[in-house]
Amino acid sequence: GNSVTQMEGPVTLSEEAFLTINCTYTATGYPSLFWYVQYPGEGLQLLLKATKADDKGSNKGFEATYRKETTSFHLEKGSVQVSDSAVYFCALPNQAGTALIFGKGTTLSVSS
Amino acid sequence: GAGVSQSPSNKVTEKGKDVELRCDPISGHTALYWYRQSLGQGLEFLIYFQGNSAPDKSGLPSDRFSAERTGGSVSTLTIQRTQQEDSAVYLCASSLAMDRGYEQYFGPGTRLTVT
């Protein structure tokens, strides 16, 4: 079945540093891919998505490109801010399309 | 517009008691999902509703767990004879349809603590 592997954290960066959080997947076909974010004390919210190969999802300065050759969907941001401190989850639908499968989450901590 | 809401936000119960968790999805969303988030297990799928029927309940961990949805809207997750391992944050999500491209919108969760 479909699965996702996400780099373990925590990731600790200084403000304005470059961020990459790695995510690779195994899937039948080419499902949509998602990044969700959970800010401290808040619920999960969609950060960005890509629905087909070579698509680039972007939001709030974050980007991720759907790469079928490397089965990857790495999250990047050129210059992180303290407000980006959160837990980030990579996700894709299960094979039946009835649920999302989430990575274990990567905790990002940004200091000023 | 209003997002997904869940109640209660926190629930503390004694081992062996039954609990009911409620989810109000976004109006018009036909698909509804329950997940559980715990430190050791991450985010786990529990059950999926399309309208009032549950075509996928494969994630329910035991027969102590059940869920229903009425009127294509509100859903209730019931845990009978709670155990300490049931302690977790229970998340509800809804989406427009069961389509691989539609994103799911999550509620704030119910934090369940079984003492």
Image (cartoon, rainbow, N blue to C red):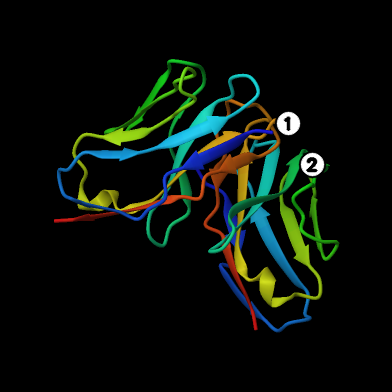
Q: Position of residue A86 (x, y in %)?
A: 35, 53
Circle 1 sits in a helix, a strand or a loop, which is it? loop
Q: Position of residue B24 (x, y in %)?
A: 64, 52
Indicate the quadrant where residue A67 lies: top left
Q: Residue at x 56, y 67 (%)?
A: B9
Q: Residue at x 79, y 47 (%)?
A: B58
Q: Which residue is mark 2?
A: B56
- The amino acid beneath tag 2 is Asp
Label 2 close to label 1 by CB (< 8 Å): yes
Mark 1 chain: A
Q: Position of residue B92 (x, y in %)?
A: 62, 52
- Decide: is A84 above or below B79: above
Q: Residue at x 68, y 69 (%)?
A: B86
- The amino acid beneath tag 1 is Ala
Mark 2 chain: B
- Residue B8 makes an appearance in the image: no
Question: B7 or A77: which is nearer to us?
Answer: A77
Q: Is residue B77 left or right of residue A46?
A: right
Q: Which residue is mark 1?
A: A96
- Residue A31 makes an appearance in the image: yes
Question: B107 or B14: which is nearer to us?
Answer: B14
